[in-house]
Amino acid sequence: MTELVADGTNAVLKLEEFLPYRLAILSAYVCRGLAQIHERYGLGWGDWVLLTTLGEVGPMTATAFGVRTGVHKTRVSRAVAVLLKRGLILRTVNPIDMRQALLRLSPSGKDVYDQMTPLARAYLKRLEEGISPDDLAALDRGMTRIGEQTQRLVSLP
């Protein structure tokens, strides 16, 4: 646990024990490994997340994608523009609400998704090697709880 140590006037934050810092560093390393996969296809992180989400979930609006992933709307717009320009996604009018556009994978986007998925799964398998199933389950529970708590904290006034 992170401990704040008071020296009388200032508190020292032990950065190497500070959970947000540790999570950010861990995320950077994990994402660097994934980048070796999606960069082969000329995709940035946000492009990869959008393409993969559409491959898993199916058609959705850019707004729904942003809500689902927590990606800021400017990054969503950038990813949409990149994938549209490359012909990896298609945008059609939402028949339920004509003011919205649905995003979905194009046939070439589906091909890229189908090629990247086994590579990402293999990366996950290598990442999990040597970690016990109990530790992986505990990590999953902890990440879920941290995610829930973070959402509560960021929604506070």
Image: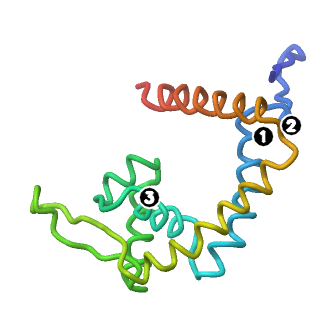
* Residue ID for mark 3: 56
Answer few, some or many: residues within 10 Å of disc 1's Cα (few below 14, many 20 plus, some between 14 and 19): few
Residue at image coords 51%, 72% = 113
Q: Earlier in the sequence, mark 2 or mark 3?
A: 2
**Residue 22 circle label:** 1
Secondary structure at badge 2 equals helix
Give the mark, 1 or 2, whose residue is nearer the N terminus. 2
Task: Give the residue number, with chain letter if any, for mark 2.
Answer: 16
The reply to whether the C-beta atoms of the residues labelled 1 and 2 are less than 8 Å apart is yes
Residue found 30% across the figure and 67% down from its top: 103
Residue type of the residue flagged with mark 3:
Glu
Q: Position of residue 95 (x, y in %)?
A: 11, 62
Q: Is residue 134 left or right of residue 143?
A: right
Marks 1 and 3 sit apart, C-alpha to C-alpha, by 29 Å
Q: Amino acid at mark 2?
A: Glu
Q: CA distance from mark 2 to mark 3?
A: 36 Å
